[in-house]
Image: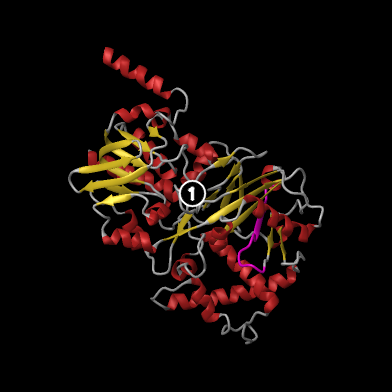
Amino acid sequence: MKEEEEEIEKKKNSANGDQHNNNNQVERKKYKVIILGSGMGGISAGKEMIDNGMEDFIVLEGRNRIGGRIYQENGFSCIIDLGASWIHGIDGPNPLKKMAEQLGLKMDVTYNSVLDEADFQLFDSNGKEIDPEFEAKIIHKLSLITKAAKDNVEKTEEDSSVEDEYNKVINSTRDSDGNIIQFDKDEEGVLRWHQLIVENWEGGSMGELSAKDHFLSGEDTAFGLGDAFMVDGYSPILNHLLSPSLSERILLNHVVEKIEYEKDEGVTVYTNKGVFQSQFVLCTFPLGILKERTVSFSPPLPAWKQDAIEKIGFGLLDKVVLQYDSPFWNQQNEGFGFVSDKMGEFNFFLNMLIPSKVPILVCYISSQFAKEMELQSNEEIIQRITQIFRSIYGESVPFPTKSFVTRWNSDPFSKGSYSFLRKGCTQSTVDDLRREIGGLYFAGEATFKPSGYVHGAFLTGQQEAKRIIQRIG
């Protein structure tokens, strides 16, 4: 009885202060299960463990916070998610949508990932608004060559890139009058802007994206169409999944350096704060970390696993958040675009006035230009964006009162934003990334097809935790 009282008192003391930073538990080194990472996949897995009465586990997290690529910035006048901020696929039984509804979270729903033309303005490199009728003609031409590219992809077994498929049809497709579809210099910039929206969506370049996946799976999310912007942020969902019992099992600032695994002898995890042993380990690291090989595996991961890690792409989507005292842009529009002479430069701005009633613009930057942007200083970035705004709205446009620039590619715990399927990737590639090796299991958004979604991380974390529990018996 005395031992039980001491254990209860120890748990109470350890839960004081930061509920997610109970470093006193480091004294115990052996557990049945270790979960690596406290993003959505790791939190989902931990909740499944708790819900099934499995308490002999810990969660090791390298950051000084939970959430991974779900991260909220509190320095603005409304909630701003710097990482994941949408629930994709809301027509079907998406578990995250269900949770958001149960929690009464505000969501801004759209069924058009590029936004309706009536709610969106596009400006050229000189700051002049592009005529909507001119843009509509280009969109129509794009739809025709997209259909031609899709038809080609359906007829061939071998995969190629999205860019390759567009190049095959761009000067050979005919319109309804029998004329070959071509784009002049003025049209090419607008065409490329609309194609770049695909890169914003996927995080990878057109030259990398799998044509089979893009043209044939397209908007597949596993839960139908529709996207919901999380006005109240993703943090309430994470907090909903966190029980006190799960929170006290999360050890922050524990950076994993090496994982030793043997088929019948359990798994050993080496961190900057000690060595941990377990029967099973569930690895929910972002694919970017596996690609960087910042964590070593002994023995080395088998060839099929390394091949999957290499083949699947890991994209980049950064944000520049800009708050002002008052709006200088069209307040009724959901956003606006900029067709720069430089590929991908600050091309998409979301108007937060509509969902959050605060004069904030969020610029989305992806792929190669995002990597280049991360090398610039915040001052250089804000200076250039302000220059763009002044070319559109006049020299009176002020500098923002508050701003934030994400750098997910430079983040040592993510090395990017989310996964996408490269040319040649199939369902079996994703299955190999997820497949366990002895007692070493894998989960996360990259191990789910369609890839790149938060619900993929949630579901794989939950499912792999169930499989581990079944093996424990």
* Camera-nearest residue between 377 and 300: 377
Residue at the image position 39 percent from the left and 55 percent from the top:
292
Q: Please state which amino acid type lies under the numbered disc 1.
A: Asp
Q: Up-down: is 195 above or below 230? A: below
Label 1 residue SS: loop
Q: Up-down: is 50 above or below 256? A: above
- Give the colouring mode of the picture: secondary structure
Q: How many marks?
A: 1
Residue ID for mark 1: 411
Q: Main secondary structure of the magenta part?
A: loop
Q: Up-down: is 115 above or below 66? A: below
Q: Which residues are magenta?
A: 341-352
In the rendering, at what x and y percent does residue 324 appear? 73, 45
Tell me the quarter of the image containing the C terminus. top left
The answer to whether residue 139 of the structure is visible from this angle is no
Q: In which quarter of the view is residue 190 placed?
A: bottom right
* Camera-nearest residue between 281 and 62: 62
Q: In which quarter of the view is residue 137 placed?
A: bottom right
Q: Up-down: is 124 above or below 112? A: below
